Image: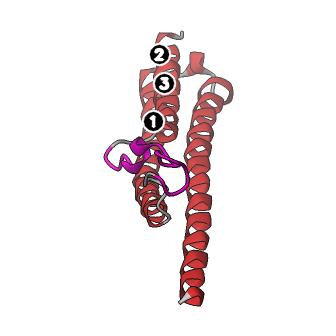
Amino acid sequence: MTQDFEKRQAVVSSVRSTVAGYIMYWHKLCLEVSILISSGIVAIVTFGIDRASLDLTGKALLLLGSGMAVCAGVFLIVRAARLLQDLRQILVRVDKHDQLFDDNVYLKDESLYPKAWKDSDAVRMDLVPKWSIGLMLSTWAFISLLVLIGK
């Protein structure tokens, strides 16, 4: 019986470690995608092309192309955010198994984790993907404004 319990605890611990590693990886990927796309937009629009020599059609194509890159980035980050929500749900299930939300298991008259953590917030996107999307959209909007008002 003890050996079975120890085996299950080892599996739970391994799952927790693996899922936490994946969460960190996907958060990092969200940031890297947004930084790569944002810096690419800035580099291409402001440094790589002489805006003064572009006609209105050239500017429109430049903004359309960079807008498509932003849309692709948003798509990737939203997909990653959905995966992050799934991974957080797995962590909550592991923590429930370890009774980290139950009172009097680890601490007298309280749980080790706050009760609010039990709600894995699977509906709402967390802060890292939101900021990543915000960075790309604000960079694109600002650069688009510069291109359109530039002579």
Q: Which mark is residue 130?
A: 1
From the image, tell me which residue sits under label 3. 138
Front residue of this view, candidates 94 and 108: 108
Task: Mark 1 or mark 3: name the one nearer the start of the chain.
Answer: 1
Report, in whole angstroms, how far the alpha carbon at label 3 lies from the one at label 2: 11 Å
Q: Amino acid at mark 3?
A: Ser
Q: Which mark is residue 145?
A: 2
Report, in whole angstroms, how far the alpha carbon at label 1 lies from the one at label 2: 22 Å
Q: Which mark is residue 84?
A: none
Determine the residue located farthest toward the right in the rendered image.
47
Which quadrant of the figure contains the C terminus?
top right
| Local secondary structure at mark 1 | helix
Q: Is residue 58 magenta?
A: no
Nearest-to-viewer mark from 1 and 3: 1
Indicate whether 10 appears above or below 149. below
Q: Which residues are magenta?
A: 104-123
Q: Is residue 111 magenta?
A: yes
Task: Bin the neighbour count of mark 2 within 10 Å (Cα to Cα): few under 14, some 14-19, many 20 and up.
Answer: few
| Local secondary structure at mark 2 | helix
Nearest-to-viewer mark from 3 and 2: 3
Residue at position x 54%, y 80% in the image: 8
Residue at position x 41%, y 58% in the image: 89
Helix, strand or loop: magenta stretch: loop
